[in-house]
Image: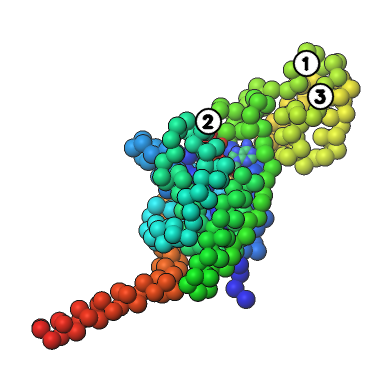
């Protein structure tokens, strides 16, 4: 039996940070061996909230950065098709053909759309933002994906794509497997301890940060504000330094010991942070090595994205051809062209 497929992606709005790794990319590492992987660089999705000429100019560099970040964490280019959404025209076509299978009310009821509009500071909802889950359905159904790893917030969109697939199959014939959401997660708080790590909040540690930067960022991290000296018992729960230790320090005994002494007021922030900086840099070192390896091959990332995009187009053409056949659109065109051909033969 051929391998089942997964589809997932990233908006090319910047490089990846530890929050992306925890919320999403570490799960891709675990899935890449069991599934055929389609990893989208979702620049059309970016246009729903960021569409100035400047934003668009930045896509190419951000797309490269995102692909390189993924190779650096150990995503295997032989197992994954990376592709640029805006260069796969079949996705646009499929979106239009699917858009008759969903109502405006259904889209308006999704809380995510309103949230995205609010987050982007938009007072009114543009048509492409309302249609964003339909485009996402086209992304998912284009490679006929079975599984879609998403954060909890996007689960409802995969449910929608499943509904669209079911409606299509019922109305026109079986073309699509019904995609299933695979809810992955984990949220990483920012170094400020105030909000989740976000590249736009200046509270991020990037996968591409060097050791000195990581150390500096760790030492400026927010900890327990009530702890004015090392002998004051401190709070471990909700303390970002310990959340990072839990995620990134593989030495559990060390982490437990630090927590115990922190609660008892027997360790200073400096030691806790020193050990975190070491753990994070140990985590990032192999990532840095792989990055250097891929970076030394000039043009490699572009080539990978280019080849992947061509492969995705082929995939898209195959799906669209099935879709149009099932809907009867191919038949319409065939009749028109046969009629035209006959006339040409009669009147050469
Ligand atoms: P921006 O500051 O522009 O909002 P961001 O750094 O928050 O950017 P997004 O593009 O909003 O990144 O995030 C893309 C996806 O990455 C999210 O849907 C989520 O799945 C995951 N993600 C981002 N930040 C985190 C985080 N701190 N913890 C866990 N997952 C995250
Ligand atoms: Mg965000």
- At horizontal 62% and vertical 54% (from top left) the residue drawn is 149
Q: Where is mark 1, residue-wise?
A: 226
Instruction: Note whether 122 is above or below 344 in the view shown.
Output: above
Q: CA distance from mark 2 to mark 3?
A: 28 Å
Check contact, mark 3 vs mark 1: CB within 8 A: yes
Q: Where is mark 2, residue-wise?
A: 200
Viewer-proximal residue, 271 or 27? 27
Q: CA distance from mark 3 to mark 1?
A: 9 Å
Crowd rating for badge 3 (residues with CA inside 10 Å; few <14, some 14–19, many 20+): some
Q: Where is mark 3, residue-wise?
A: 235
Image label count: 3
**Which quarter shows the N terminus?**
bottom right
Considering the numbered disc 1 on the image, is that residue within a helix, a strand or a loop?
loop
Work out which residue is located at the far left of the displayed protein and give it: 348
Counting from the top left corner in percent of width and height, residue 135 is at 46, 53
- At horizontal 61% and vertical 69% (from top left) the residue drawn is 3
- At horizontal 45% and vertical 32% (from top left) the residue drawn is 123
Q: Is residue 336 left or right of residue 348?
A: right
């Amino acid at each position: 039996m051929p391998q089942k497929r997964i589809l997932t992606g990233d908006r090319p709005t910047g490089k990846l940070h530890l929050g992306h790794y925890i919320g999403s990319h570490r799960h891709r590492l675990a899935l890449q061996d069991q599934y055929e992987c389609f990893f989208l660089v979702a620049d059309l999705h970016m246009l729903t909230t960021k569409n100035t000429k400047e934003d668009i100019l930045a896509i190419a560099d951000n797309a490269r950065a995102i692909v390189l970040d993924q190779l650096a964490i150990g995503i295997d280019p032989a197992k994954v098709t990376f592709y640029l959404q805006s260069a796969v025209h079949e996705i646009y076509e499929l979106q239009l053909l699917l858009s008759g299978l969903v109502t405006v009310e259904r889209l308006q009821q999704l809380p995510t759309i309103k949230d995205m509009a609010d987050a982007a500071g938009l007072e009114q909802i543009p048509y492409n933002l309302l249609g964003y889950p339909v485009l996402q359905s086209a992304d998912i159904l284009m490679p006929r994906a079975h599984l879609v790893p998403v954060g909890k917030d996007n689960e409802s969109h995969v449910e929608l794509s499943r509904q669209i697939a079911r409606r299509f199959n019922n109305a026109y014939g079986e073309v699509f497997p019904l995609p299933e959401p695979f809810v992955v997660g984990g949220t990483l708080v920012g170094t400020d301890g105030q909000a989740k790590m976000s590249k736009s909040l200046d509270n991020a540690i990037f996968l591409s940060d060097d050791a000195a930067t990581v150390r500096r960022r760790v030492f400026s991290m927010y900890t327990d504000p009530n702890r004015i000296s090392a002998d004051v018992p401190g709070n471990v729960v909700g303390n970002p330094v310990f959340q990072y230790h839990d995620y990134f320090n593989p030495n559990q005994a060390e982490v437990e010991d630090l927590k115990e002494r922190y609660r008892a007021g027997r360790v200073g922030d400096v030691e806790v942070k020193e050990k975190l900086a070491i753990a994070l840099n140990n985590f990032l070192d192999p990532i840095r090595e792989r990055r250097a390896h891929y970076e030394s091959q000039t043009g490699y990332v572009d080539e990978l994205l280019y080849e992947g995009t061509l492969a995705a187009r082929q995939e898209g053409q195959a799906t669209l051809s099935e879709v149009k056949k099932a809907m009867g659109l191919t038949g319409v065109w065939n009749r028109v062209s046969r009629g035209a051909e006959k006339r040409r033969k009669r009147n050469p």
